[in-house]
Amino acid sequence: AQKVTQAQTEISVVEKEDVTLDCVYETRDTTYYLFWYKQPPSGELVFLIRRNSFDEQNEISGRYSWNFQKSTSSFNFTITASQVVDSAVYFCALKTSYDKVIFGPGTSLSVIP
Amino acid sequence: DGGITQSPKYLFRKEGQNVTLSCEQNLNHDAMYWYRQDPGQGLRLIYYSQIVNDFQKGDIAEGYSVSREKKESFPLTVTSAQKNPTAFYLCASSIDLTGQGSFGPGTRLTVL
């Protein structure tokens, strides 16, 4: 069975602090895709990153970075020097082959000025 | 600009009435999806469609129906059989079922 766990329900940080959002997934498939989405208060989901199971390179995009470790089935997301505009709910998601996307429960991040 | 539109943004319905939520995309994507989001929870898949005139049930299809007569459109009908329809509904599309998906702005449905 496929499953995505985001153990942190809510996180609060002070502006400019670094914060890491955890994501642990379960799947028996060898080919799969992992995603992170941001949902600001407006409600629309914004795609952040997609990673396939054969590419374990970590990625950095500005203040965002992702750490993919197959050995621990984790795909963690770090925001460096957080800003108030980063306040949102963040979802990690898993897609296996041609199956549907499974979303984690989300982590609500509040960045306090 | 390419994207997904959902209308209306807010929708109110009396108990016992059917209501149809619109979803249109001009991204030329083959796959389209409907998700339901309840407060403090993740997204749950209602229905998805890989190509025109074909669709499959997701995890919570009971009380919902869809059609896919055109590539651009994937309307969702919330029927009176759906016992707890008040939720935020998100439509998405992707090039195929492996794509990351683009999401619409969502429709917030409230049953009075």
Image: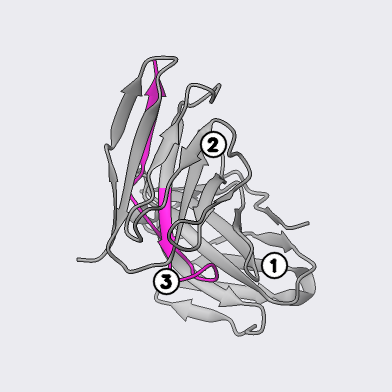
* Co-location on one chain, circles 1 and 2: no
Residue B13, quarter of picture: top left
Question: Magenta stretch containing residue B94, yes or no?
Answer: yes
Residue at which label 1 appears = A74
The residue depicted at 76 percent of the width and 64 percent of the height is A27
- Tell me the magenta residue range: B91-112
Q: Amino acid at mark 2?
A: Gly
Mark 1 chain: A
* Co-location on one chain, circles 3 and 1: yes
Q: Secondary structure at mark 1?
A: strand
Residue at which label 3 appears = A63
Q: Secondary structure at mark 3?
A: loop
Query: CA gap, disc 2 to disc 3?
Result: 26 Å
Single out the mark in the foreground, 2 or 3.
Answer: 2
Q: Is residue A35 above or below residue A8?
A: below
Decide if residue A18 is in sight here: no
Q: Residue furthest left?
A: B1
Q: Amino acid at mark 3?
A: Arg
- On the image, the x and y values in percent for residue A49 come to 48, 71
The residue depicted at 76 percent of the width and 71 percent of the height is A29
Total marks in image: 3
Residue at which label 2 appears = B40
Residue A45, quarter of picture: bottom left
Mark 2 chain: B
The answer to which of marks 3 and 1 sits earlier in the sequence is 3
Q: Is residue A61 above or below residue B42?
A: below
- On the image, the x and y values in percent for residue A48 come to 44, 67
The residue depicted at 35 percent of the width and 38 percent of the height is B21
Q: On the rendered structure, is A36 left or right of B15? A: right
